[in-house]
Structure formats: structure tokens, C-alpha cells
Amino acid sequence: MGFFDSFSSKQKPQPDPTPATPAADKPALAGGVIPRMAEARAKLEARDLPAAVAIYTEVLASAGARPDVLVTLSGELGSRGHVRELIELVAPHYDAQRHGPATGINLLQAFLSLRQIDSAQHLLDILFALNRPELEERLIGFSNALGELMAGHDAAAPTAEQIAGDAPVQNKISLASISKPVWYYGLEAAAPQLLPAKDGKLRRVAFAQCSLPGLSDFAARSARPEDETGRFCRGLALWFAETFTASAGYDASAAVGLSSALHYFLFPVEWTAENIRELNDTSTGGLDYVVTTSLRNRNDDFELTLRIWEVKKFRELKQFSTRWTPATADAVLGQFLAQLRLYMEWTALPEGSGPAYVPPAVPTAHVQALGATLTQFLGGKGVLAPAQVEAGLAVALRNARANPDDVRAQLTLITGLLRQKAQGAELDATARQHALAWLATEAAQKADASALMIKLA
């Protein structure tokens, strides 16, 4: 089911049989309700939210008791990710007996989206009290989701409002969009042929940094130099984006969190529809899909949940989940990527359009290397403080050795070496030896990468 219900003329909610009696002292709406609702919808489509809210407020003042008005309003706002405005406008008017369950479900999902647990619990009780058998299965699903929040899966994590309230004013959080494979930054001039050229209409997808629900010390952890967990959260998004850059039908990017205090940001709550909308609004040309992930670790038993969002309707299309231990991580992640590629109809690029894609044999090593490479790239740009950037190429070298048949693993190491050279630093001798040996192979020639050998001379 979609993240929010939006009813069209062919799918109208069934109101409660109890008739609504409009208050006698409500003034008639100038121009009529339907035309004004259409005007508000047009404002939303033009991304003029304040104007739409003003019209909705005017409509609710005279027609807030009408079930059709509330369900349409909540669907229009919810389907576009404006969950705060949905709550502010709808909650004061909603009466379950009068307006029926459809609006209530939209409102409930808005409460859950913003982790407003008490409000969600109260509304869920009201909806169950309607005794609608056709809603029982769906309400149980919401009850299970709420139960997870209350059980501590997300309850220990601060809400978006708490994050904003606790953060110093000068320490602002922003998203950095990585629009190319992270190993390509530094190779643009030397080997432009390594980035495939694509024709036709492409589906634009962004892979968001993996969140860590329940991370109570997220502020302190974010301020410290990255550890393996932080690298994994960013590297996973980079790996997925790299994979879909190698697909014929996609224009892929990754989004990671940064603090204005020159360090990364770890997300202690899952991405919501509102976050998706914000990411889309800050992406040039907009997005078709956003893929979010969340990771939970209980005594080295890892659980990863992935959600695919359709941006046009701000609805969740699909959810995958998997679990692993350190001993099974590589096999499980490899299978998980294959499942994602199958669902999203990943197709290989024509021969000659960049290096052929081969999934890494050891995904954990590649994910860590991508995360480390991003840190070195952003450190070189001054986006991260020097103390946040680990010197050396040990992580990238380990990846290149673990994935000898993965061209992208080798390129990740090479771009690190070229970055060292550009900075005037002494090249890592062991890493350089490995890179030169690979560049002399037939695989490097086939990938059209052997010309980089002269750059490491």
C-alpha cells in the first residue's frame, strides 16, 4: 500500500452512515468548496505550499465538517509529503464518527511519520473502536509499527524536532549529493571514458545514507572521526548508487549527511516521507525514486531494512529486509543487492559504455573502501576537518585485494593514489605496486583503464 491514501473520483471513501449536520453559523465559502480545493491543489503542484495552506484554512473554516473535504485535503498534502501541515490542518477538525476512517488513516500515518507516538496511539484506539472488519488487517499493521516504536526500536532515538532543538544554531545539518561514483572524482580528466554515457530517458534515483535507529549517542558519534559503522552507512549508499550508475536505465546518486561543524552526521531515526520530499526539492530536476535503508545491530546480529519510495506520490513502493552476522555478511549482502537489482529492473550497459559491471565478491570490503574514499575526497575539498580524515590507503588496498575481479575496486584504490599525488604526499608504496600490477593486466586494458599507469609513474 502507498504511504498515504489519495482518493480519486473513482475511489471515494465510504462515509460513516451518521449524517453530518453543518453548523448553521458557518459562512458560505466564496466561489464554492470544489473550485477552491482545485485552486489549492494547483498551488501544491506549483510548490506554493503557503498559498495552498491559506486556501485550505479558508475552506476548513466553513466546510471542515464535510468528510469529502477532509479526506481530499489529507490525501493531497500527504501524497506530497507535507505531513506537518496535514496534522496542523486536519487534526483539529477530525471526528472519526463524522469523517470516517479514510481521513483517520491518513492522519495516523502522518503521526507515525513524525514519531508522534502518543497521538498515533490515541488515534489508533479511535479507529479500532469504529469496528470496521474491512480495516482490521490494516489497523493491525499500524499497531505493529507503533508497537516497534514503543518497544524501543525507534523510541530511544530523538525525533526530528528534538534533533533540531538540541543542535547548536551554528551546527546545521545538510545533505551532500554524490552524483558520480566516488572513485571517479579525480579521474575525470585522466579517464573520462570510465563514466558511461547514456541515451534516452533515465529514471533518477537517489540512495540515502543508511540510518541507525535507536542510536542514542548520535551527536557524539557524529562529531568523532568515522568508524566502521559510519563508513558502512555512507558506503552502502555509495555502493548502491555505483551499481545503478552501471545500469542502462538509471541516473543514480547518493545522499549523505554533513554538519556545518565540518564532520559527518549520523541519522538516529529512519527517513520519512517529509525527508524524501526535502531531498527531492533540493535535487536539480527532481527525482523519480529514493531508496532508504536502516540498520539495527543487536549483539552482532545485524538487520537491514530497505524501502523504495516513489517520489511523485511520496509513497513507499516496496520494502526488503535481511539479516546477517559477521560470518555471513558478504554472502547476504551480495544476495540482497541481486534482489534489489531484480526488482528495479537493472540492465547492463551496452559493451563499450564504461567498465563491465561485476558485483564485488566481498561487498563489506568494497562498502568500507567507498566510505573511506568519500572521506578523503570531502576532506580534500575542505568539507571535513583534517582531524576527520584518516590518512593512508589501507582500507582501499584491502578492498582491491579482496575483489581482484572488480574493476571498480581497483579504481577506488587508484583514485586514492592520484589524490595523494595531487596533494604532494608520498605515495603508499604497497598500494602503488598493487595498482601498477593491475593496470598492466588484460582486465585493465579491457576496461580502458590501462592509460592511468602513466599517472602513477
Image (cartoon, rainbow, N blue to C red):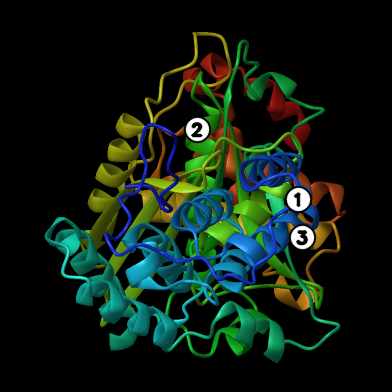
Q: Residue at x 53, y 90 (%)?
A: 217
Indicate the amino acid at tag 2: Phe
Q: Position of residue 116 (x, y in %)?
A: 47, 81
Residues tagged 1 and 3 counted as in contact (Cβ below 8 A): no
Identify the amino acid type marked 3. Ala
- Tell which of 55 and 455 is nearer to you: 55
Q: Is residue 32 left or right of residue 444?
A: right
Identify the image quadrant of residue 41: top right
Task: Provide the residue designation for mark 1.
Answer: 30
Of labels 2 and 1, earlier in sequence is: 1
Residue at the spot x=69%, y=28% of the render? 453
The residue lying toward the viewer, choosing from 154 and 301, is 154
**Callout 2: 10 Å neighbours few (<14), some, many (20+)?**
many
Estimate the x, y position of residue 244 in percent, counting from the top left.
50, 32
Placement of the C terminus among the 4 image quadrants: top right
Q: Amino acid at mark 1?
A: Ala
Residue 253 x/y as whole percent:
61, 41
Q: Which residue is mark 3?
A: 54
Q: Residue 150: in sight, yes or no?
A: yes
302 sits left or right of 188 in the view:
left
Q: Is residue 202 above or below residue 397?
A: above
Q: SS at mark 1?
A: loop
In the foreground, 14 or 191: 14
Q: Residue at x 26, y 83 (%)?
A: 299
In this view, the residue in front, 4 or 295, is 4
Dot 1: within a 10 Å radius of its alpha carbon, few (fewer than 14), some, or many (20 or more) residues? few
- Mark 3 residue crowding within 10 angstroms, few (<14) / some (14–19) / many (20+): few
User: Which residue is painted at 66% across and 67% down in the image?
Assistant: 61
